[in-house]
Image: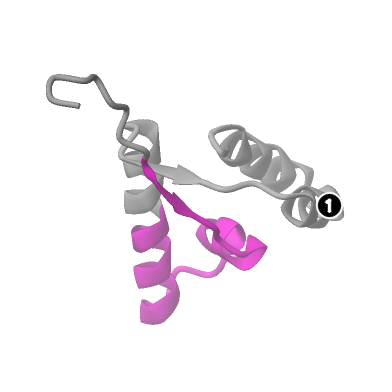
Amino acid sequence: MAGENRKIKNLKIYLDMCVYNRPFDDQSYPRIMLETQTFVILLEMVYKNKFDFVNSFALEYENSKNLNIENLLKISDFLEYSV
């Protein structure tokens, strides 16, 4: 109907756990650095409510197996912004 308020849904993006871990990889490789920069840009867009990251049991489970506690906690923070 004309004039109706409709909420436009954000594009939902599912990322594999390797993408969430990319910022913690060796950034001296150009491909890794580019992938990290891309992830950071997407993350900023999620923070600005332009996109939504999709969370899953698999992501939570994989992250729970992360041996680096600092990385695990940071990735948990990233996942908190997911739907």
Of residue 31 and residue 39, the one placed in the foreground of this image is 39
* Residue at (55, 60) in percent of width and height: 15
Q: Is residue 32 visible?
A: yes
Residue labelled with disc 1: 61
* Residue at (78, 57) in percent of width and height: 58
Q: Quadrant of the C terminus?
A: top right
Q: Quadrant of the N terminus?
A: top left
* Color encoding of the figure: one colour
- How far from the left and from the top, in percent, is residue 73? 70, 37
Magenta segment boundaries in residue numbering: 10-39
Tally of numbered tags: 1
Q: Is residue 10 left or right of residue 32?
A: left
Q: Is residue 60 magenta?
A: no
- How far from the left and from the top, in percent, is residue 62? 80, 57
Amino acid type, mark 1: Tyr
Q: Is residue 23 magenta?
A: yes
> For residue 38, what is the image quadrant?
bottom left
* Residue at (58, 56) in percent of width and height: 20
Judged from this view, the residue extending furthest toward the left is: 2
* Residue at (53, 34) in percent of width and height: 81
Of residue 29 and residue 60, the one placed in the foreground of this image is 60
Q: Is residue 31 left or right of residue 20?
A: left
